[in-house]
Image (tube, rainbow, N blue to C red):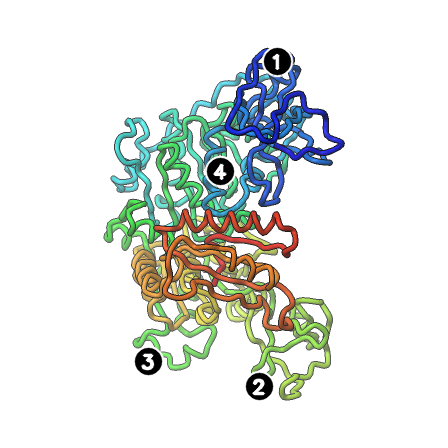
Amino acid sequence: MPPSESDAPVALFSLPASAQGVAALPETAHGWPPLPLAAVIIDSAVPHLDRRFDYLVPPDLDVAAQPGVRVKVRFGHQMMTGWLVERHERITTGTKFVPLKTVVSTLPVLDPDVLALAERTAQRYAGNVADVLRNVVPPRVARVEKEFVDDAARAPETPAPVRSVSDYGLSDLDRLVDVTQELAGTVSRCALALPSAHGDWDAMGLLADVAQQTAAAERGVIIIVPDVRALERLSGLLESRLGRGGFARLSASDGPTPRYRDFLRVKTGQRRIVIGTRAAVWAPVHDLGLLVVWDDADTLHSEPRAPYHHAREVALMRAEAQACRALVVDTSRSVETQRLVESGHLHEIEVPRTVRHAVSPRVIATADSFNAARDPLASRARLPHLAWSAARSALEGKNVPAGPVLVQVGRSGFIPGLLCESCRNPARCRTCAGPLTYPNQLAAHRGEASCRWCGRHDRQFRCSECGSPRLRAGARGVDRTAEELGRAFPQVPVLSSSADHMLTTVDAEPALVVATTGAEPVADGGYASALLLDGDSQLQREGLRVPETVLGHWMRAATLVRPASQGGTVVVTAAREDVVGALVRMNPVSFASRELAERVHLQLPPAVRSAEILGPRPALQRFIDAVQLPYHAAHSPWIGPTPLSEDEPHGTGDYRALLFFPYKVAAEVTAVLRSARAASSARRTDGAVRLRIDPVDIL
């Protein structure tokens, strides 16, 4: 109930402030409807307003004011939008009631089961329900709504026939998508690590087959992919089989009108197949039978806005709540998914070793003892002789079918990092201390470095440590690598793919395809070879997830290469044995299992859950002091507060505190943190305190 304000409309019914318990409103009083009260969730990010408020429903809005519609209400001195989530007749307070101002749209776009999932997500991530609901329903487009109001009854599309997934030789997967059987006992929630990403094992083709089979059994299916590039590939496959009208796409990149139109098609039952990025996990699919999350390790699956939920966790919670099946699939394996497998929350779909070896390329490590003895300079060369020979054989078709060669590099740009040639310290801008770079070949030829932060050009560099004017490359980007390979392999086309210019596919003709991690295009028939460069520099970066992330990049590149029986070869230039060994064996599951065992020993995520609190130091300290954790710890469980930046003076800027807590008390801890955040917000004397639960970039 909104607080009473002097300019608020006079309430037509109220109880004295001392009234206790609940009271019934007479059905005929003042001509109000039988269910005169509407519970509304205000669209506000303020933590202490994260609850339902009751408003009176005027008689003229009785028909339109149904659960799930958008409404406008007066809240204090301002008009705010919100969601009508329930109609009832019980009074639970003595505060005056204010009538609803208007119903924005008569279409009930918020389903009760989706609302329940949003409330559960807000509890898990200690956030506001209103923040979650902004992701649930796309922004309204009035013109599109009018189309559906005028013509609400449309028949669902008939799915096209599809081959059985038994062609993949996975009996567990057959059971997973056999949605024609009655759901009994435990619901299948599975994890699958694909050994290849082309031919019969094309991941997008597998997802399309699973979607068609589920829809053919008259069940709904949602497939969540991390980015637009994967969405375009999957969309192209489904469009070639079903036509554009056979599925719905939910992605912000499509624009508000197409996105909202497809959302309403799903809401009205016109589409059973939904594909999209992370927000598609909320799609109001009728009779949902299967939820699929592709490449769950990608950080794009994590919502960058409060409450920072992850699509994988939301999908699994929804699968449990709606008794449907779930599949987490990738060419690699995240440590979070491995924890779910080992704890019994997910069932492992095991690919037979013979099948995995039959579809995988041969992987060669230049740093192993045999190859290192044959090429002693391999550890110093960015392109060792073994990698150069593999690329030449693939391009010229020596002993193997000729085809394109993928060259994976870790950085974009030309020379993204510069060092002092004398002391090897990073070259810094004299204005803002930002990193200096050569953005292109012309700048490198002129010796004109520029700052990546402020853009200032520097032709007279002097090292702040030793005074040397000479620079050297600290890292080579995709453009510099393409130039060097173009000189090494004359007469061979060189293509580059990065975030600035991303290729989706390449043909089967011999060519050098230089791509940054995550931007590798798919080759028609698979690559003849792949060179994974800059492995050591990638593994030297700081972060808890670095080895897992680098192996994931390598695995996705390796699965794009032809199998060893067709001459497919992958050359990796890195020395870390555990990560390289997992790639050589093409077995990311064993690596994820070892990583998880180390996290359990060290009590680090995901073996435990985590919380990150950010804000000014005084507010952060008051927040920590106010939290009463529901379990006893031998010593303080808090880490920090510590400044986010070492360059900031003491006591200024934002600080961070970390909390690790076990799963068995996770619900109680998140509830306490959520309550403390709301109390801190209500005081208004503290600075803003931000709270993130299970952040993917915590360390």
Name the residue type under label 1. Answer: Ala
Q: Residue at x 45, y 39 (%)?
A: 120
Within 10 Å of the Cα at label 2, are there few (<14), some (14-19), or many (20+) other Cα atoms? few
Tell me the distance, in whole angstroms, between the alpha carbons under discs 1 and 2.
Answer: 85 Å
Q: Amino acid at mark 2?
A: Cys
Which of pointers 4 and 3 lies earlier in the amino acid sequence?
A: 4
Check disc 2 and report its element: helix, strand or loop.
loop
Q: Position of residue 349 (x, y in %)?
A: 28, 45
Q: Which amino acid type is marked by label 4?
A: Glu
Label placed on residue 373: 3
Between disc 3 and disc 2, whose residue precedes?
3
Residue 29: assigned label: 1
Residue 399 in sight from this viewpoint: no
For this orientation, the residue located farthest to the front is 18
Labels 1 and 4: the sequence-earlier one: 1
Q: Which mark is residue 119?
A: 4
Can the viewer see residue 691 in this picture? yes
Camera-nearest residue between 35 and 142: 35
Can you tell which quarter of the image residue 254 is in? top right
Asked which secondary structure carries label 1, the reply is: helix
Dividing the image into 4 quarters, which one contains the N terminus?
Answer: top right
Between tags 1 and 2, which lies in front?
A: 1
Residue pointed to by mark 2: 423
Q: Secondary structure at mark 4?
A: helix
**Disc 3 from disc 2: Cα separation:** 30 Å
* Residue drawn at point x = 66 percent, y = 84 percent: 464
Camera-near label (4 vs 2) is 4
- Coordinates of residue 84 in the picture (x, y in percent): 58, 28
Where 239 falls versus 658 (above or below)? above
Q: Residues within 10 Å of mark 4 (few under 14, many from 20)?
A: some
